[in-house]
Image (spheres, rainbow, N blue to C red):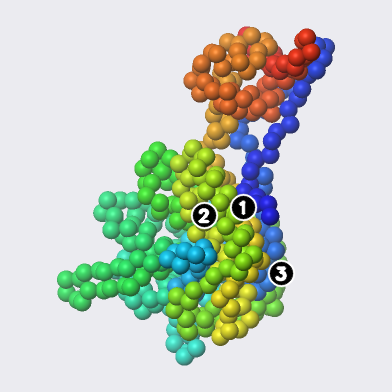
Amino acid sequence: MKFNFGFRKKPSTPVCTDEKELDTYWEPPAKLHSVSLEEVTLDPDYLPKSVRNFVFSNAYRLNDASPEFVAGAVIACAAAVIGNSAVIQPKRNDVGWTVVPTIWSCAIAEPSKMKSPALDVAQALIPKENSSGKPTNLVIGDVTKEALTLKLVDNPKGILFSRDELAGWLTGLYSESRAAERGFFLSAFNGNSTHIESRISRDDVELEATVLSLLGTIQPSMLAPLLESRKEGEKNDGLLERIQLLFYSTKPEQHTDIAPDEEADTSAKQIFQKLLSFRENNDRTRFILNDEAQKIMSEYNTLRIKRLSKEEQGHIQAVLGKYGALCAKLTLIFHLLSMTNANDVSNIIEAKHVKMALKWMSLVEFHYHKVMSLVTEDPNIEVAKSLLSKLPELPNQFNKRYLQRKNWKGLTTNAKCQQAIDCLLEHGYLKEVSESPNGKPRTSYLIHPDFHK
């Protein structure tokens, strides 16, 4: 099975093989900007049938909003209902590692892009009453840590923290006065950490495990400063990396006027009712993978760890390091969203749900890079700009060996020189010249006349 992580396609480059071609007309070069990722979009087969039509029909009904906004919210809401009633064991033999399926999801877009309505339709799926007719109270908004702790006491299997605008919450958590609260949320994401809260006038509050899924929205301009601070080494304690279902949409809004899909809505509500029933009758029920599913999951993690060992950028290392657990969480959630009977759920997960989760891993990584484009530049672009600034100091035609001998900053290795050359070729600043003097092939590069002294 092939895994698609949104890798960049190798650019095609212009090649000159005849001296007469050296004087051919040059097109104006393209502005240096980040090479586009191979786009990954949400397709219906990324979702279980129980919620598939719900996601796409509601996204279209909301003035053709991004379906990722609805899908991410549905998954976070499902995770909140499941809580720690179910855990997944991602490895066959390591019985000591289980993962609680908490999910933190955020919709990123400019105002009036239907972020909040998309979250609202998903939250409406969470049952308001349990099988005994009592209120579930599984959703909580902007409250103090103390109030949130008490809410978890009443719902020890987990709840959903829903915040329409996350910017203020995230910024506030990084103040020194709220360090303890930040630590509380960091541990609540894992779903396994105990929490004891001492109170002066009342009995202490003790949680065997803090289990919290999160759902919110944010505008790109509000998120960028937080990402920039993390890039500079501040606000780098892993809080932002926990918001793993980040979906950034620039899709234009268009007017739609359609009736709700009652069949799709009913199907989604029914599966959420089954999730609640499962929650009521289970406590950390362990799910494992069948042989085929285990093989696929192991192959994915082997490849992920290889990428991790080669990755130089710290922020990418941070998210890749958490993707193994995320893939396992999504696998479990998709398995439970596909159940037919809440009282008879197989604890053996099939390969189709791992494959579905892997599609999401490509989607999630694509959107992560899209989000990071707000504050980071592609390394290819950075090194290419270094070479672009030096083109006037090079002869009209040069080779890679000559360039490397210059020992310019950022262009000291063979790999970096080739990286910069490839990028300038793609954008039209250079042309590749292939020659074979004395029968020996030789490659050099011709500089665009507008960028040569």
The answer to the question of whether label 2 and label 1 lie on touching residues, with beta carbons closer than 8 A, is no
Is residue 279 shown above or below 226?
below
Looking at this view, name the residue that lies furthest to the front: 93
Residue 403 is drawn in which quadrant?
A: top right
Q: Amino acid at mark 3?
A: Ile
Q: Quadrant of the N terminus?
A: bottom right
> Circle 3 — which element?
loop
Is residue 272 shown above or below 76?
below
Question: Residue 8 or 39: which is nearer the viewer?
Answer: 8
Taking 240 as reference, is 356 left or right? right
| Residue 191 rendering spot, x and y as whole percentages | 41, 66
Q: Amino acid at mark 2?
A: Tyr
Question: Residue 38 or 113: which is nearer the viewer?
Answer: 38
Of callouts 2 and 3, the N-terminal one: 3
Q: Residue at x 79, y 13 (%)?
A: 439
Q: Which residue is mark 1?
A: 362
| Residue 236 rendering spot, x and y as whole percentages | 38, 46
Q: Residue at x 48, y 54 (%)?
A: 322
